[in-house]
Image: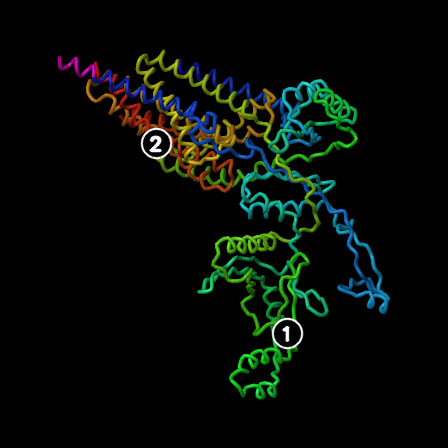
Amino acid sequence: MKQNSTKILVALIAIILVVGAIMIFTKGLAFELKYQENQKIEINLGKEYEENDIRIITNEIFGKQPLTIQAIEVYKDALSITTTNITEEQKTELITKINEKYATELNADEIKIENVAHIRGRDIIKPYVIPFIVVTIVILAYLLIRYNKLNSLEVLTQSIGIIVLAQLVLLGIMAITRMPIGQFTIPTILLVYMLSTYICTAKFDEDLESMKEIDI
Amino acid sequence: MKKENKNIMKVVKLLTIILAIILISMIGFFGIYAQSKNQMVNKVKDYTYSKEINGARTIKLELNGETTEVVKDSEGNIIEDATDEQIEQNGYVKEQVPNNSDEVKTQENYKKAKEIIEKRLSSYDAQDYTISLNETTGEMTIEIPENDSTDTIVGNIAKIGKFEIIDSETKDVLMDNSDIKSSDILYNTTTSGTTVYLEIAFNRDGKNKLEEISKTYVKTEEENEQNVAAETTTAESVENNTTDETTDETTTEKKITMKIDDEEIMSTSFDEPLTTGKIQLSVGSATTDSTTLQDYIAQARTISIALDSGKLPIKYDVVKNQYILSNISEQNLICIAIVIAVVVAIGIIVLIVKYKLNGLLAGISFVGLTALFIILVRYANVIISIESIFGIISILILNYIFTLILLNNIKKIGKEKEENIVNKATKETYIKFFNRIVPICIMVIAFCFVKWIPISSFGMISFWGLVLIATYNAVITRILLKIKVESK
């Protein structure tokens, strides 16, 4: 029974890794809007707006383009619309529809389309690199000491293997599901990392117990 | 009769604990509402959110496109402080020079400017910032959390940070940013109050230059002895004497001028050679007023950060400074909470199916821990970021694992023994579980000390979660299960 479930798990991981790799090589990874070059327009309505109303208008104009609507300042009377690309026609149409909806007299010519550069991946990762390296080294050292009765090389390789494999599976799932790399990526990596260290200790505990049983 | 009484007491105990858990859950999940100014206000402390959830100050920096008028001689050298007469006499020419020439508008300089701004943000402790740089135009968009120091950062982030020590007469540059090693803020407290000093430490070259300058630009005094002798006759003239002594000094020294961002900080000469490679500048005067003192410290800190981070190769203007709210709305957070609640409910159902009444009690206890955890998070001032939401999820997963191990142990020990089952099972569970999570504890403690809000908030929230798992389960879960298991 246990062997069967292990086989299923191994097969599932293999499928995720293979399909994920194919997806990365063919389609690449998806990035959240903030982490790719985008264009932005800011509209000062002068009166409070409902995000859902604006969303209906932007859906009509920008279709399936990824888009974020953010309020500027706390009064919620100005907003910023960010998307991958905004044409002059789209801008004019947007302003016209907003004018119709809110009875405003905004002039499309006075509203500029701003180009916003992307935030580099390495800049997002930078603050996490050193803490992760330090923590991994300390954890590996702990595992080597704690499970010194087991083969040290095996403990080391298996620990690194489990931690890396867990992250690769996560990457594979992200590639397959087209989950964009963005705000939720690093927290997910943290969670998976945390759980993979638990899997390591649970596995080595089992190995120790079975070793004791053999000795008896 | 005694056994019946015992059973009634156990039921009462069980119900009391369950009711306490329900009460905690109500407070944790919904809050305590009381009327205040005709409104119902939640009296439970609100969460502190990070910039991804709360919104951020967005600053846009663009290259300065203005020009500055300079006076040049026939050889093209810039002449400072030239009067109209001098310009006419010497045939100098006035020219409009762009603040950012085409030569400085390079990708390399844009990247260098970004690095300097990053250093400044770190020095201002503006953790959790993002910078996007347009490498073609040099424009930068910076997002920083909104707090007490945000305005100071915005006001100083684009300062050039140009440091110069020049000859007061010839305007020759004697020292510049390349000679600075570091700067620091020092304090000296006397009876008249506390004085704030900005200490600039120079590198090897700078130290040698400073020593040379301090030997060259020396203070010399020649006293007019005749005046002093003449005015020491009457008691009344003692004061005048003192005044005259200073007035009659004939100063012949060469002076240096220290400038930061072309603003004159001081003009002085030296009493003795400076051999330490350090120079101390007093910021303001001695004061006992804490607000004034804080202002002086802030001024000194601003200069120190500008000097330490280096000189911006490009002049930037802050063209936009707005508070932009997050695209993660309260509704999104509620959705996340609902998803977590559904998963927890499924988990509890699994426990009930597998362990029957023990599973139900462990499930109730689990809900209590979750409620207590979110109350603790509010009062422990942990910043709620996306990372810390994942920290909460990881703690819930770990507590579920703990509960599973505990229920398994109760089942296993229950088959072998009849006494003290829960205590023994709890002890075994603690040993097994906490042995297994030592790497997680290492990670959590290390992350608590990282100076980057997303990581530290994950560390802090997980730390409190682990403390809660250790204490709550030893008290509440253990007692709940003990009453039920050992009432047979």
Residue B83 is labelled as none
Quadrant occupied by the N terminus of chain A: top left
As rendered, which of B350 and B475 lies closer to the eye? B475
In the picture, residue B134 is in which quadrant?
top right
Image height of B4 relative to B171, above or below: above
Mark 1 vs mark 2, CA separation in Å: 69 Å
Image height of B215 relative to B467, above or below: below
Q: Which residue is mark 1?
A: B216
As rendered, which of A204 and B213 lies closer to the eye? B213
As rendered, which of A166 and A72 lies closer to the eye? A72
In the image, the segment drawn in magenta is B1-8
Was residue B2 drawn as part of the magenta stretch in this picture?
Answer: yes
Which chain does the numbered disc 2 sit on?
Answer: B
Dot 2: element = helix
The amino acid type found where label 2 is placed reads Asn
Nearest to N terminus: mark 1 or mark 2? 1
As rendered, which of B42 and B273 lies closer to the eye? B42
Dot 1: element = helix
In the picture, residue A124 is in which quadrant?
top right
The residue sitting at 26% across, 25% down in the picture is A216
Q: Residues within 10 Å of mark 2 (few under 14, many from 20)?
A: some
Regarding residue B404, the answer to whether it shows in the image is no
In the picture, residue B30 is in which quadrant?
top left
Left or right: residue B98 compared with residue B365: right
Labels in figure, total: 2
Residue B135: x, y in percent?
A: 71, 40
The residue sitting at 69% across, 31% down in the picture is A44
Residue B44: x, y in percent?
A: 42, 29
The residue sitting at the left extreme is B1
Regarding residue A9, the answer to whether it shows in the image is yes
Main SS class of the magenta portion in the image: helix
Q: Which residue is mark 2?
A: B435
